[in-house]
Image (cartoon, rainbow, N blue to C red):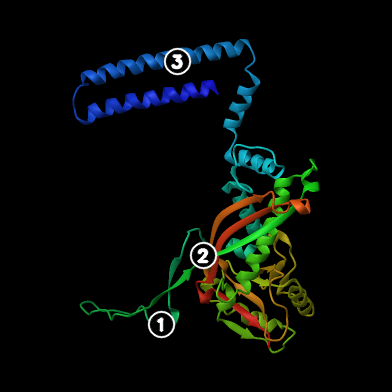
Amino acid sequence: MYKKKLMEERQALVDEMVALRAGAERENRAFSEDEDKRFAEIEAEISRIDASLRAIDATRKLQDAPEEEVVEEKRAEESVEVVETRAFANIIRQRNDANITKTDNGAVIPKTIINKIIDQVKDLSPLFRMSTHYNIRGKVAIPYVDTANDNISVAYANEFVDLQAKDTKLLAIELDGFLAGVLCKVSRSLINATDIDLVNFVIGKMAAAIAEFIDKEMIKGTSGSITGLSTATQKITAASATAITVNELIAAQDLLKGAFQAGAIWVMAPATWTAVKKVLAGTSNYELNASIENGFAGRLLGKPVYTSDQCEALATGKKAIWYINPAEALAVKTVEDSVQILNERYATQHAIGVVAWLEMDAKVQNQQAVGFVQMA
């Protein structure tokens, strides 16, 4: 720690020397009397510090460094993520840690931890991961072309003849900031079990809860809050209220123009995917590839299938199957907020609380990049 302090002092002196020289060069002049004096003083101070540093290095070779200093220097070399993760575990177990901001009822955890939670959410929710993200606080206006009123076109032209002006219309969707939170209660018995990886346990539980919430809001939406895919307009209506056909799946895929096919995926409930596979089992099976590589359930008509419990079932009037290019269709705003430990609130339950907050919104930004099958 002492050596680190000396090195910081030395660097500050070097910076001052550079500033003195730069001032003289900028004004194209020689040093003033005061500047000459200060420059000499700085040189002498640096020489004394260098001598002290050499002495530290020499004595350290002759004997082991004090344990406290070694630990302090090792901690200084550790990444912010490692330090803050250890601090998170310590605060859950109610051990003191200087890297955590204390509050009256617990501690506010650094951004590193909530970033880990969001990373796991992206792993659990492919729809969320593949969407276009805007990490900006407050309202965000995203412009897009009103395709119903887009009259821009290319035509043959002749020299000295004016081109005919065509007009188009730009609209905008506005992403708001809806606050969402998740509370995870951890038993003190679990906390006291030293063989449990508390940080990953808590992060995993909270990420699963947030992923379930985000999937629900992105697929079903909530009136007056996150609308998600609930405003999508391109659809085909199935002939049956409870069954799907191969021709209807082909028609759903063809809702998207060729420009949006690259990167498109199917999204449906697990039970719906089971029903689709049973239908395809009676065909030549060319539409289905049952591969489970790359983290998805399989391939349908050449495109990956992702399943989510938040999708509606094959039932009357339900939006049961989605075909979407998430990067083009969905605009998502997520702002990582905070994670906080609540030590006292659940003391009577022999537990502590871990609460995470985030600001979010999700809307369709391009209707041409998403379609769905609605049951009869």
Q: Is residue 80 above or below residue 367?
A: above
Question: In this view of the protein, can residue 265 be seen by the observer?
Answer: no
Residue 101, horizontal then vertical, whole percent: 58, 43
The residue that appears at 62% across and 38% down in the rendered structure is 83
**SS class of the residue under badge 1?**
helix
Q: Which mark is residue 50?
A: 3
Q: Report how far apart the C-alphas of labels 1 and 3 lie in the structure.
A: 73 Å
Name the residue type under label 2: Gly
Residue marked by disc 2: 177
**SS class of the residue under badge 2?**
loop
Residue marked by disc 1: 149
Q: Quadrant of the N terminus?
A: top right
Q: Is residue 298 left or right of residue 68?
A: right
Residue 345, horizontal then vertical, whole percent: 69, 53
The residue that appears at 75% across and 44% down in the rendered structure is 197
- Residue 195 or residue 263, whichever sits in front: 195
The residue that appears at 47% across and 23% down in the rendered structure is 7
